[in-house]
Amino acid sequence: MGKVYLCGAGPGDLDFMSIRVKHLIEKCDVLIYDALVDTTILETTTAQTIYVGKRAGKHALAQEAINQLLIEKGRTSIVVRLKGGDPFVFGRGGEECMALEKAHIPYEVIPGISSAIAVPETMGIPLTHRSISRSFSVITGHTKSGKVDVSAYAKIPGTLVFLMSVGTFSQIAKDLIQQGKPGSMPVAILCRGTREDAYRKNCTLETVDEALQDPQVGTPAVIVVGKVAAMDLRSQAPSVCVCGTEQFTRSFQDQCPTLCVRQPYLQIVFHTDKKINFQSYSHVVLTGKTAIDGLFRMVDDIRQISHLQFVTIGPSSAKYLYDTYHIHADWIPLTYTSDGLADLLCGLPDANLLILRAQKANSVLSNRLDAAGIAYTQIPVYDTVVGQVSDIHEDFAVFGSAQGVHAFFKQGGHIDPHTTVLAIGPYTQAALVAHDMQNIQVAKQATISSLIQKWEECL
């Protein structure tokens, strides 16, 4: 018999999803997910994935059809029904539970952090604050009739939190004023909260119409009404934007002592369908964490590579190799760049090297090996696809590769003149210079910890 888990995905950023939900996604047979879910979670599962998201005017499936889908899949499979926020906070999770109950399908509800709480908090607004607000109400701005009756809420002295209300809030604001709320009451429109492109717009009930015309205002959004909406308790620490792959930006955030804006616009695409005769090589050279993952995607039996000596480009990759695949690196260069790696490999004249790297890699390593007469085979095991970028207005911008720099500017990205740009190494620095960047600081070593150390020196 199967079972359905109705899980809350949290308010957007994957970091706010519970460990239990992540574990269930890794193990389930079927994953049925909503529109506001961070889709990078799909990379962690081998399950059948089905999108059933609902956005204004665009429903992949009607609710009744979703209920039937859950019943059908839940009879024989372990199903994760992944819903944005919390399943029971305007998520129609109750309706899905009732349908499963009626069909005698076992189910369990796993709570998620609701955007009603998380978004105001991450954008500096305490929903309750002693002497200012002793209660808060969560209200939907989306109803079947299109009319939201606010007469009762207008008389509540606490904070009002409106979800799904960008399209109706102009009228809601007028009704609140008509029912007794002062037009000067603070309002905060919080768009895309917890995500990289989060945006906060402050106004009052009587200036809402003008605020809603701001081109950066859009869905999804949480709208807060009350005295606390004028507060901003976000940390005043210097702001940081980190750019590159999901893995790099998340690793930097995990080690950085301040909250970062992440721009993971480089998506990895593996090319690991190649058949390699590993027996003909003496060393495998791994130019980063993604190359390590690429190697093990091509290995059917660990004994295929048991004779190889492992070379990583730096200690961070060596640690990842051991932590993830329980293999110690045999060789690590003294400096963690292509030149440093070439210095090491040119000292192995009798080696036959297998080098695994990106499709678009620089030619420094191959040029040096050719000049030294070192036998090697170079195989691209992954490529990168460039997604949408956002302009950088933060105090610091961090780049982990020259490719990431070129991709950012090729997509039309702009960095404010006041922003200090941190580069992981000389090639990344050169790429920034090529795009006329001047305020550049370079890490002493090509590691995330060294990047953070350089950032701390700049404070």
Image (cartoon, rainbow, N blue to C red):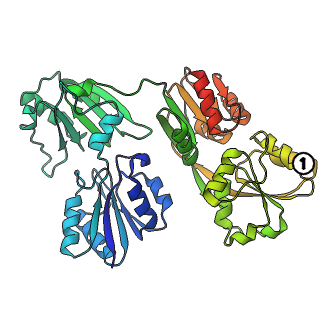
Q: Quadrant of the N terminus?
A: bottom left
Q: Secondary structure at mark 1?
A: loop
* Percent of width and height locating residue 294: 66, 59
Residue carrying label 1: 347
Q: Nearer the viewer, residue 367 or 75?
A: 75
Picture residue at 48% right of the left edge, 63% below the top? 45
Quadrant of residue 133 within the rendered picture = top left
Which percent across, then down, holds residue 91? Answer: 25, 54
Q: Is residue 307 left or right of residue 298?
A: right
Foreground pick, 304 / 92: 304
Q: Is residue 215 visible?
A: no
Q: Residues within 10 Å of mark 1 (few under 14, many from 20)?
A: few
Numbered-mark total: 1
Q: Position of residue 208 (x, y in %)?
A: 23, 28
The quarter of the image holding the C terminus is top right
Question: Is 214 displayed left or right of 246 in the figure?
Answer: left
Q: Is residue 121 above or below residue 278?
A: above
Left or right of 237 on screen, residue 404? right
Which residue is found at the position 70% from the left and 30% from the top?
434
Vertical placement of 127 versus 48: above or below? above
| Figure quadrant of residue 448 | top right
Q: In the rendering, at what x and y percent does residue 134 appear?
A: 16, 32
Residue 363 appears in view: yes
Q: Residue at point 36% right, 40% down?
A: 192
- Residue in the image at 56% along x and 30% along y: 397
- What amino acid does circle 1 point to? Gly
